[in-house]
Amino acid sequence: MSKVQLAVRIPEKLQEKLDNYIGQTGATKTEVVVNALGEYLDCAETIPLTERLAEFDKRLSLIEAQIKVN
């Protein structure tokens, strides 16, 4: 699947929320934006399964690490 680059301007508050989210989950900005667009446009199934599974795996690992710390 080929990919194209997209540049957007977003409000500063949204950028802060994005930064906090990626800091907590370990996801990349690209992963978050691609998944959010897929959900918003009701076409998440077009995102390759391997990419979606890799993101869920990262999230699960982070959650497991946080549980062990607490």
Image (cartoon, rainbow, N blue to C red):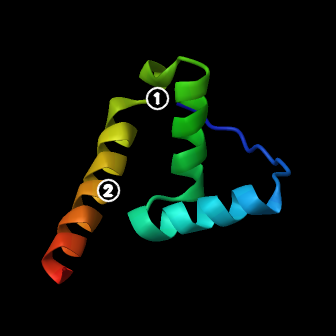
- Image disc number at residue 6: none
With 53 as the anchor, is 17 left or right in this view? right
* Gap in angstroms between the C-alphas marked 1 and 2: 17 Å
Q: Secondary structure at mark 2?
A: helix
Contact? badges 1 and 2 (CB < 8 Å)? no
The amino acid on which the numbered mark 1 sits, given as a three-letter code, is Ile
With 69 as the anchor, is 50 left or right in this view? right
Q: Secondary structure at mark 1?
A: loop
In x, y percent, where is residue 45? Answer: 42, 20
The single residue placed furthest to the right in the displayed view is: 9
The amino acid on which the numbered mark 2 sits, given as a three-letter code, is Arg
- Image disc number at residue 47: 1
With 28 as the anchor, is 26 left or right in this view? left
In x, y percent, where is residue 21? Answer: 51, 61
> Would you name the residue on which mark 2 appears?
59
The single residue placed furthest to the bottom in the displayed view is: 69
Q: Residue at x 60, y 66 (%)?
A: 19
Q: Residue at x 56, y 37 (%)?
A: 36
- Note whether 64 is above or below 36 in the view shown: below
Quadrant in which residue 66 is drawn: bottom left
- Note whether 23 is above or below 41 in the view shown: below
Q: Residue at x 41, y 30 (%)?
A: 48
In x, y percent, where is residue 12? Answer: 80, 62
